[in-house]
Amino acid sequence: MIMGFKELKQQARQSLQGNWRKSMIVVALTTILSALPSWIEMMVRPEDYFDPTYIVDYMSMFQPSSFGVFSFLWYLLIPGAVVLGLAGFFLHLIRRNSATETDTFEFFTNLSKFGKSVLYNVLITVYVFLWCLLLIVPGIIRSISYAMTPYIMQDHPEYSVNQAISKSIQMMAGYKWQFFLLQLSFLGWIILAICTFGIGLLWVFPYIQATNTHFYEQRKNENEVVKG
């Protein structure tokens, strides 16, 4: 059984001790990389972000145009490699108490790995979208089932993306609600961080990521004990 939230968070803080700076840098870089077109749009047209009708026009970013093509390709090719690299960084952090910023860009340095990261991004997006067509709640539940996939792909590079997704579903069986509550337990910190104009999120996001990585590590160890 997964240890309590308090213990998971304590382990996360211990892993981050002496590693806060690099973790904050990595989270900042990956946040920018994941949504670069949106950041560009915000800098070019900042007034739109305070316009209540902007959300209606958001999809114009993807309309046929040079910027629309750039945005589409970026969101197709980049986020998967970022998510998988971030998982690798925090796995190294909690297991070896050391990780380097370059760990985050592992999937950009190898064509085969990069292709796999694109497939991961596409499949996760499609699967969650299809579940959301039923109702939003089933989509959320299914996305939680997929939450361990990046870590599994790091630990088992021999797995196909679908094999890693299936393993994540198996690993999260009976633990989805607990993982959901774990994410909610950070809500207070997120609200406080937003009150600092978002600067505090540079501290909160590594904390969340490290805690989630310890959650994965606990589930992985439990599965190995059961198999043994």
Image: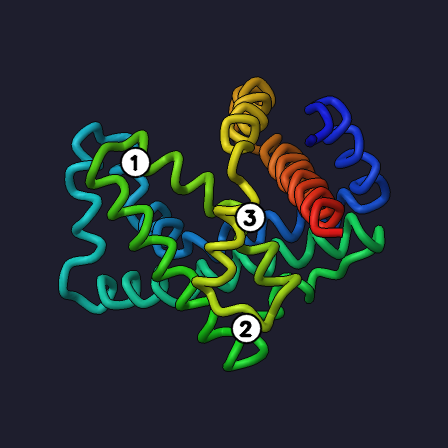
Q: Which mark is residue 68?
A: none
What distance separates the C-alpha of mark 3 from that of mark 2? 21 Å
Question: The residue tagged with tag 1: helix, strand or loop?
Answer: helix
Instruction: Give the image location of residue 120, x and y in percent.
Output: 43, 62
Q: Residue at x 34, y 45 (%)?
A: 42
The residue tagged 3 is: 148
Distance of label 1 from label 2 (alpha carbons): 31 Å
In the structure shown, which secondary structural element does the residue marked by tag 3 occupy? loop
Residue 213 quadrant: top right
Q: Nearer the viewer, residue 127 or 58?
A: 127
Task: Tell whether label 2 touches label 1 (CB within 8 Å).
Answer: no
Q: Residue type at mark 2: give it.
A: Phe
Residue type at numbered disc 3: Met
Confirm whether residue 193 shows in the render: no
Q: Are marks 3 and 2 in contact (CB under 8 Å)?
A: no
Q: Which sits earlier in the primary sequence, circle 1 or circle 2?
A: 1
Please report the residue visible at 56 percent of the width from the left and 27 percent of the height from the top.
178
Image disc number at residue 49:
1
> What is the x, y in percent for residue 194?
52, 25
Quadrant the N terminus occupies? top right
Residue 39: percent from the left, percent from the top?
40, 50
Question: Residue at the location (84% across, 55% down)?
Answer: 96
**Which residue in the structure is indicated by mark 2?**
108
- Mark nearer the N terminus (3 vs 1): 1
Secondary structure under tag 2 reads helix
